[in-house]
Amino acid sequence: MKKPSFLGEFLVNSGQVGSVIPSSGFLIRKMLPVTLPWHKMDQIAELGPGTGVFTEYIQRHRNASSQLFLFEQNEAFRSDLARRYPDLTLCDDALRLGEIVRDTGKPFDLIISGLPFANFSYELKEQLFDAIHDALAENGTFVAFQYTLLLKEHFRMHFPTMDTGYTWMNIPPAWVFKCKKGSSRTLAADII
């Protein structure tokens, strides 16, 4: 079975796929630094894993007892992820985050997103941000990358405690939004 390509899927499904190539290692390390407290995370979600470059990194670093859930709408990517990671729960819609929280009885400590929010309607963005916020643990973290800063205020409306970063070492260069649920205190040093 041939692995789906980002370029091919972008050309066919540009509303779902936000880039023509997978994320770089630089972007992965910007979003998931080595200081991340993996040992404290029981439940992790990845939204829009695409070809699985973040998934592979998370699999190598997460606590063996933690649970990782993947949410991918693109059928070709979802099929490839199911083949490569048969032990992971794979869902077709990020709006189902709340179902997983109800089913497991645990909120998410970390939600990673590669979703192309700029491609979505205002209503869908609102639904997704609400679902993500509601599914996070009280002190949970939401980390997303985007190719524009235009959505910064939209992120801030849902997550007042937010840090932004940038990496040129990705094609295209990307902005990273690290958002914290809960109190308005600053992000913990081990999450930044």
Image (cartoon, rainbow, N blue to C red):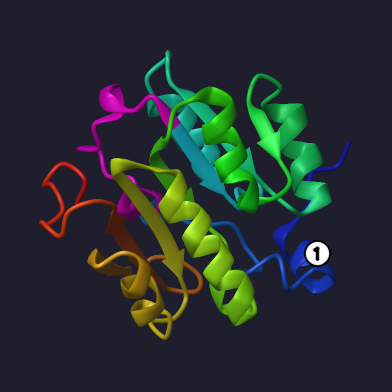
Q: Is residue 176 left or right of residue 50?
A: left
Q: Magenta residues, as a range?
A: 28-43
Relative to 187, residue 68 above or below: above
Residue 35 point in image, percent of width and height: 20, 37
Residue 37 within the segment the image draws in magenta: yes
- Nearest the viewer among 99 and 86 is 99
User: Which residue occupies 75% across, 31% down?
Assistant: 82
**In the depicted structure, whether residue 111 falls above or below residue 58:** below
**Quadrant where the N terminus is found in the figure:** top right
Type of amino acid at the residue the image marks with label 1: Gly
Residue 156 relative to residue 187: left or right: right
The question of residue 180 being in magenta is answered with no
* Residue toward you, 45 or 35: 45
Which quadrant would residue 8 be assigned to in this image? bottom right
Residue drawn 26% across the image and 68% down it? 164
- Out of 147 and 88, give the one closest to the viewer: 88
| Relative image position of residue 191 (x, y in whole percent) | 21, 45
